[in-house]
Amino acid sequence: MGQLGFFDTDKRLAALSAKGDPLEAIARLVPWESFRGDIEAAVLTPEAERKSTAGRKPIDAIVLFRMLILQSLYNLSDEQVEYQVRDRLSFTRFLTSGIEDCIPDGTTLWLFREKLAQAGIIERLFDRFDQHLEANGYIARGGQIVDATIVQVPRQRNTREGKRDRQEWPNTRGVEEETGQEPAEG
């Protein structure tokens, strides 16, 4: 694999745009900043209640809300949406992040969603999101990303002789149908 050039990511994103990336259309149609006030009121700890100003800065509330939108659109678990954002350029671009930026983990997303649910605003936020799309003539239809999991299959340790012996065993299935008698035990 060769070294990435300065404009390789831009070229790949341009190719995605040319193919009609639906996330790019959603990002353009929805006024994301209009959600900020409601979200931050529900999830941020007020300055007066903070124990200290030390520690990392909180992750942008709009980035987390966009992750919830991705999760809903593609029917993903918390861990799977984290993985897909790391893996797919279109998802990373939808979050307005670069490939070098920190991606919130599944637990952070779960805690964010729980705070919104406790505040009772999560459904209202999604309704507003849908209204913005509908006002522009769109409807959000959820899809699904198939989780291709590779599982190691147990190996059979049968020899050719063992296979031949099993093929020669009498078949007790169907004996009753053919003869009208129950198969003999033994």
Image: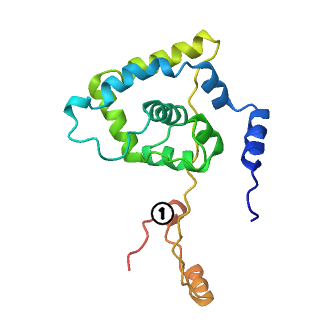
- Identify which residue, 25 or 180, lies in the foreground: 25
Q: Work out which quarter of the rendered image holds the N terminus and state it.
A: bottom right
Nearer to us in this view, 60 or 163: 60
State which quarter of the image contains the C terminus.
Answer: bottom left
Q: Reply above or below: 118 against 171.
A: above
Q: Residue 26: x percent and y percent? A: 61, 25
Disc 1 marks a residue whose amino acid type is Glu
Q: Could you tell whether 50 is left or right of 126 in the image?
A: left
Task: Residue 111: name its quadrant.
Answer: top left
Residue in the picture at 55% in, 14% down: 132
In front of the other: 31 or 49: 49
When the figure is inspected, residue 10 is found, relative to residue 142, above or below; the finding is below
Q: Report whether 160 appears left or right of 54.
A: right
Q: Is residue 177 above or below residue 73?
A: below
Describe the element under mark 1 as helix, strand or loop: helix
Give the image quarter of residue 93.
top right
Image coordinates of residue 168 in percent, x first then y, are: 58, 82
Q: Is residue 122 left or right of residue 160?
A: left
Q: Which residue is mark 1?
A: 176
Which residue is located at x 49 percent, y 21 percent?
A: 33
What percent of the width, then of the height, locates residue 89? 65, 44
**Colour scheme in use:** rainbow
Q: Is residue 158 left or right of residue 22?
A: left
Numbered-mark total: 1
**Disc 1 residue crowd, few under 14, some 14–19, many 20+, Cα 10 Å:** few
Name the outermost residue toward the top.
135
- From the viewer's side, name the closer residue of 1 and 155: 1
Instruction: Identify the residue at image location x=59%, y=83%.
Output: 163
